[in-house]
């Protein structure tokens, strides 16, 4: 494992190209992330993940997926989860806790069954961002609630249920994307709330989570660091480690998002300098992937140790 580099990549299509095979052999990324463009059916997706693991020679090799349900459904060619949004489950939690636990466990068991079938072993959930009025719709119904206590409690169950199904989890978008008024895929959100407010609201939803992975938000919290997004902010990553208390593997959000203003090389270097452990690149652009790979260090002992701990839930 110690010859791997500290980045995660997406691939272009439903099977590996010769260039992608060569890339994986040469640069050995820590993980690969799947999107709907990579998944036609269970059999094809299983062959794809098997081919990735064969190259990396690791049956537990990390393969991630954003399978939230609702509109973020990478399995859309296999099954529809359109109505099963985080908002749906958040409302059910308030209306009838007993019913909620039955429905939510069934939903996660079904999702886990499909992920195990295709060979994905980390689902990038739960979304722990709060639902905020007049904020960007990029979070919207992907949030469980406006109440951090409800978000936190459902988040704990989400992590527990996926781990029981031998699927890793990831909390996002730490330390909170809910207040953003623009979509960070295209613009840079700036949050002007004081740290005293944030620590009692948005940031609280991320505390004490028993997951191995967290994904940063490409957002500027101007009262903490008025120049850098979370992904590139030493100050905020220090806050994530100390005040929020997240001690495991910190992954950037996608480096090809427009919220980050530098080029791919600059964005990769700044990600590691700020304190992220792994850089994420999703669009499958081979030239950009090469740049991320060349500017990502080999994984260190901390990442090796945490990855080995994560592997234990897969057994």
Image: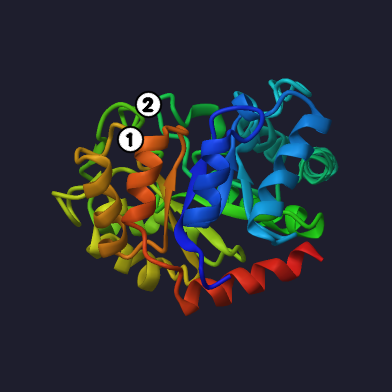
What is the residue that sits farthest to the left in this orientation? Answer: 227
Front residue (pair 91, 81): 81
Q: How is the image coloured?
A: rainbow
From the viewer's perspective, is 104 left or right of 188?
Answer: right
Q: Is residue 165 visible?
A: yes
Q: Residue at x 25, y 63 (%)?
A: 273
In the figure, 199 relative to 21: above or below? below
Q: Residue at x 45, y 61 (%)?
A: 5
Label pair 1/2, CB-CB below 8 angstroms: yes
| Residue to which mark 2 is pinned | 136
Query: Could you say which quadrant of the image residue 308 lies in?
Result: bottom right
From the viewer's perspective, is 156 left or right of 9?
Answer: right
Q: Position of residue 88 (x, y in %)?
A: 67, 29
Residue 180 disc label: 1
Query: Could you say which quadrant of the image residue 7 lies in?
Result: bottom left
Crowd band around label 1 with a 10 angstrom C-alpha radius: few (<14), some (14–19), many (20+):
many
Front residue (pair 48, 194): 48
**Placement of the C terminus among the 4 image quadrants:** bottom right
Q: Position of residue 1 (x, y in %)?
A: 58, 70
- Whole-Å distance between the Cαs marked 1 and 2? 6 Å
């Amino acid at each position: 494992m110690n010859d791997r580099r500290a980045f995660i990549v997406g691939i272009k299509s439903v099977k590996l190209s010769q260039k992608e095979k060569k890339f994986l052999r040469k640069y050995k990324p820590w993980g690969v992330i799947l999107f709907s463009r990579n998944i036609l059916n269970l059999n094809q997706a299983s062959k794809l993940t098997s081919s990735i693991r064969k190259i990396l020679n690791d049956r537990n090799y990390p393969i991630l997926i954003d399978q939230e349900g609702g509109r973020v459904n990478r399995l859309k060619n296999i099954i529809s989860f359109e109505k099963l949004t985080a908002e749906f489950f958040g409302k059910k939690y308030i209306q009838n806790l007993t019913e909620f636990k039955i429905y939510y466990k069934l939903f996660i068991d079904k999702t886990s069954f499909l992920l195990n079938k295709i060979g994905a072993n980390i689902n990038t959930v739960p979304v722990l961002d709060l639902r905020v009025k007049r904020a960007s719709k990029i979070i919207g119904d992907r949030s469980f609630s406006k109440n951090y206590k409800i978000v936190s409690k459902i988040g704990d169950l989400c992590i527990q249920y996926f781990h029981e199904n031998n699927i890793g989890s990831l909390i996002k978008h730490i330390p909170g994307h809910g207040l953003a008024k623009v979509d960070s895929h295209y613009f840079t959100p700036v949050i002007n709330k004081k740290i005293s407010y944030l620590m009692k609201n948005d940031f609280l939803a991320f505390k004490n989570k028993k997951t191995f992975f967290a994904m940063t938000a490409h957002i500027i919290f101007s009262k903490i660091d008025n120049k850098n997004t979370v992904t590139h902010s030493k100050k905020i990553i220090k806050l994530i480690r100390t005040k929020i208390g997240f001690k495991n593997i910190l992954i950037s959000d996608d480096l090809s998002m427009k919220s980050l203003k530098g080029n791919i090389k600059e964005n990769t270097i700044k990600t590691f300098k700020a304190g992220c452990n792994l850089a994420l690149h999703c669009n499958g652009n081979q030239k950009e992937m090469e740049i991320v790979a060349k500017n990502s260090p080999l994984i260190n002992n901390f990442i090796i140790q945490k990855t080995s701990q994560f592997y234990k839930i897969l057994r």
